[in-house]
Amino acid sequence: MPDYTYYTEKYLGEDIPEAAFPQFARRAAEELARMQNIYPMAPCKGIEPDTAYAMAVCSIADAMYEFAQEDEARGLAKVSVGSVSETYTAPPQLCAATLALRAGHYRHEAGYYYEIGRWLPHA
């Protein structure tokens, strides 16, 4: 699995803070493994398998981090504008459609480094 140095120096990532990277990289690796169990996948032409894996993990981790930031923003404790006030104590539950769209986005991110499709032979 790629480490933070790989993320910043090879992938050129800059969004995920170093302390948060291991958690997001682990979740991204689990998501990539789930995809590999469902879809036939092969590294894109000209990309070494280890590089495809590491870059896809970084790419998915970046997307997961961005979604986490959006979810956190929705859990705002209190907002007041004039006489209008809103308070949330926890982010709203994500619906199935949102989760499916996010899974599709992760697959799209992995697609920069893997050919994904039913026509590829299973490994």
Image (cartoon, helix red, strand yellow):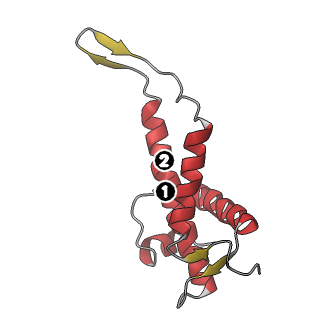
Q: Which disc, if any, is residue 118? A: none
In this view of the protein, can residue 122 be seen by the observer? yes
- Whether residues under marks 1 and 2 lie with C-beta atoms below 8 angstroms apart, the answer is yes
Q: Marks 1/2: CA distance?
A: 6 Å
Along the viewing direction, whichever of 23 and 73 lies nearer the viewer: 73
Question: Can the viewer see residue 21?
Answer: no
Q: Residue furthest bottom?
A: 46
Q: Residue at the front extreme? A: 119
The residue beneath circle 1 is 63
Amino acid at dot 1: Ala
Q: Relative to 61, is 66 on the left or the right? A: left
| Quadrant of the rendered image containing residue 56 | bottom right
Quarter placement of the N terminus: bottom right
Residue 5 vs 68, above or below: the answer is below
Pick whichever, 28 or 23, lies toward us: 28
Residue drawn at x 42%, y 67% as measured from the top left? 13
Please give the name of the residue rendered at 61% of the width and 60% of the height, measured from the top-left corner: 28
Where is residue 30 drawn, in percent x and y? Answer: 69, 60
Task: Report crowding for label 1: few under 14, some 14 to 19, many 20 or more residues within 10 A (C-alpha).
Answer: many
Residue 75 as seen in the image, left or right of residue 27: left
Residue that label 2 marks: 67
Q: Amino acid at mark 2?
A: Phe
Q: Horizontal and vertical percent for residue 118?
A: 68, 72
**Dot 2: within a 10 Å radius of its alpha carbon, few (fewer than 14), some, or many (20 or more) residues?**
few
Q: Quadrant of the C terminus?
A: bottom right
- The percent position of residue 115, horizontal first and vertical second, equals 58, 77
122 shown above or below 37: below
Exactly how many numbered labels are in the figure? 2
